Amino acid sequence: MARQTLQHKQSRRQGNKPPNPYIYRVTVEPDEDRYYAEAPALPGCHSWGYTYAEALKNIKEAIELWLEVKKEEGEPIPVEQPQAIRDADLTVGVLV
């Protein structure tokens, strides 16, 4: 926690906004010899891995990159519907 607070203070001094938290529902499903993962609320945001854990780790990274690109391009960042998050079997949280 102290590390996050320090980073937050440093980013404010540099004129940067602190990162915003986002939560998205994700799906991870077996696909032949690997696992396929996607974030349905983020068009085109998908990944894969040879194991379930690897696919989950990779989709989290894909979400972070997807959001960073949208943010850099000044495009709106989709927000997952609260009901979709409540009903989801699996969610991923990221800071961007």
Image (cartoon, rainbow, N blue to C red):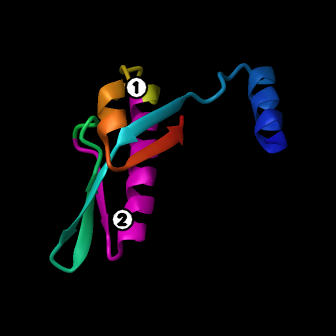
- The secondary structure that most of the magenta stretch takes on is helix
Amino acid found under the numbered disc labelled 1? Glu
In which quadrant of the rendered image does the C terminus lie?
Answer: top right
Is residue 29 visible in this depiction of the protein?
A: yes
Residue shown at the point (28%, 37%) measured from the top left: 42
Of 73 and 68, which appears nearest the observer?
A: 68
The percent position of residue 35, horizontal first and vertical second, equals: 26, 69
Q: Nearer the viewer, residue 69 or 9?
A: 9
Q: Disc 2 designates what residue? A: 55
Q: Quadrant location of residue 45?
A: top left
SS class, disc 1: loop
Q: CA distance from mark 1 to mark 2?
A: 27 Å
Horizontal side of residue 15 vs 84, given as left or right = right
- The numbered mark at residue 73 is 1
In the shown orientation, is residue 70 left or right of residue 12?
left
Q: Amino acid at mark 2?
A: Ala
Magenta segment includes 57: yes
Residue 32 at x, y = what percent?
15, 77
Sequence order check, earlier mark of 1 and 2: 2
* Residue 21 at x, y percent in the picture: 54, 31
Q: Which residues are magenta?
A: 44-70
x, y percent for residue 91 = 40, 45
